[in-house]
Image (cartoon, rainbow, N blue to C red):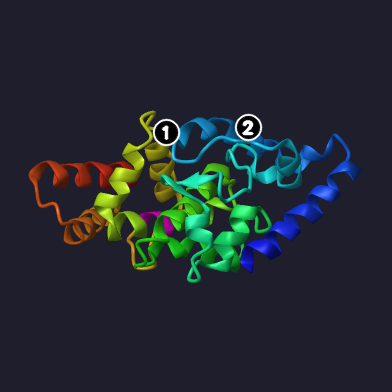
């Protein structure tokens, strides 16, 4: 039922595309520039683009979406695998179809914090929502991505490193580091002593890690240092 409703929403948006002016991209120009890189960064999203749908969801340009959940994939699964799940958040579905554009508001905060779910099936889809938001963030939106990104890395360290390693360019890792560095602070963090913040971050990651090897712990320390130098 969810898919029927949102398919109709996308059809309605498409029908109105012909009435748009060709110079309508003023507010999304910076997003388009930053996303030109993201289409190469995220190999787990299939790159099939429909011009008609892209016009209806300009802010998602560069995501490589067709908005056909049987065609698009996230983390090696078709999107329908996630959106057909009765437990899938409506916010994440709205994000995928482009009817929810993240901005500096409470709805976006709720959307991005979905990545902390213990539902292993849906977490990759919610992580994708966070990752794509990091890819398009501007100054205001960047205030919202750092904390969920940090908490995800802390709560699921092995899963986190597996995800950033999937991008062999290193751009994904750098984007997450920059996001955490910019806004990944907790209320009780001592901003004037970053060494304490990274120590706390590394400690939490190690506590939540099943890998107790020296090499993995060193990688955690290095990552925490990059986030809070």
Q: Where is residue 79 in the image (x, y as percent from the top left)?
A: 52, 52
Q: In which quarter of the image is the C terminus?
A: top left
- In the rendered structure, the answer to whether residue 74 lies left or right of residue 229 reads right
Q: Residue at x 35, y 37 (%)?
A: 166
Q: Nearer the viewer, residue 128 or 224?
A: 128
Let me know if residue 62 is in the magenta part: no
Name the residue that disc number 2 marks.
33
Q: Which residue is drawn at 74% across and 59% down?
A: 9
Mark 1 or 2, nearer chain start: 2
Q: In which quarter of the image is the N terminus?
A: bottom right
**Dot 1, crowdedness within 10 Å: few (<14), some or many (≥20)?**
some
Residue lying at the far right in this picture: please name it.
19
Q: What element carries label 2?
A: helix
Q: Which of 126 and 44 is in front in this view?
A: 44
**Can the viewer see residue 192 in this picture?**
no
- 82 lies above or below 179: below
**Can the viewer see residue 112 in this picture?**
yes
Q: Nearer the viewer, residue 61 or 181?
A: 61
Q: Is mark 1 on a helix, strand or loop?
A: helix
Q: Position of residue 163 (x, y in %)?
A: 34, 44
- In the rendered structure, the answer to whether residue 15 lies left or right of residue 55 reads right
- In the rendered structure, the answer to whether residue 220 lies left or right of residue 173 reads left
Dominant secondary structure, magenta: helix
Q: Which residue is drawn at 38% across and 64% down?
A: 116
State the extent of the magenta-drawn residues as a range: 146-150
- 115 lies above or below 1: above
Name the residue that disc number 1 marks.
171
- In the rendered structure, the answer to whether residue 206 lies left or right of residue 141 reads left
Q: Position of residue 45 (x, y in %)?
A: 49, 41
What is the number of callouts on the image?
Answer: 2
Q: Residue at x 32, y 38 (%)?
A: 165
The residues tagged by marks 1 and 2 sit, at their Cα atoms, a distance apart of 15 Å
């Amino acid at each position: 039922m969810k898919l029927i409703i949102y398919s109709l929403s996308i059809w309605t948006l498409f029908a109105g595309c012909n009435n748009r002016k060709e110079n309508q991209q003023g507010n999304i120009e910076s997003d388009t520039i930053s996303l030109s890189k993201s289409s190469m960064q995220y190999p787990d999203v299939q790159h099939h683009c429909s011009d008609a749908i892209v016009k209806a969801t300009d802010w998602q340009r560069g995501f490589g979406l067709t908005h056909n959940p049987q065609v698009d994939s996230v983390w090696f699964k078709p999107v329908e695998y996630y959106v057909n799940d009765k437990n899938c958040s409506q916010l994440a579905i709205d994000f995928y179809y482009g009817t929810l554009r993240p901005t500096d508001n409470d709805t976006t905060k709720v959307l991005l914090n979905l990545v902390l779910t213990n539902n292993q099936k849906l977490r990759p889809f919610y992580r994708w929502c966070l990752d794509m938001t990091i890819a398009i963030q501007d100054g205001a939106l960047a205030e919202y991505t750092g904390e969920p990104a940090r908490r995800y890395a802390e709560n699921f360290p092995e899963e986190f490193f597996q995800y950033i390693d999937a991008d062999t360019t290193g751009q994904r890792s750098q984007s997450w580091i920059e996001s955490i560095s910019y806004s990944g602070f907790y209320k009780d963090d001592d901003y004037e002593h970053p060494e304490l913040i990274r120590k706390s971050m590394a400690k939490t990651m190690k506590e939540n890690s099943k890998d107790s090897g020296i090499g993995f712990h060193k990688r955690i320390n290095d990552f925490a240092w990059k986030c809070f130098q």
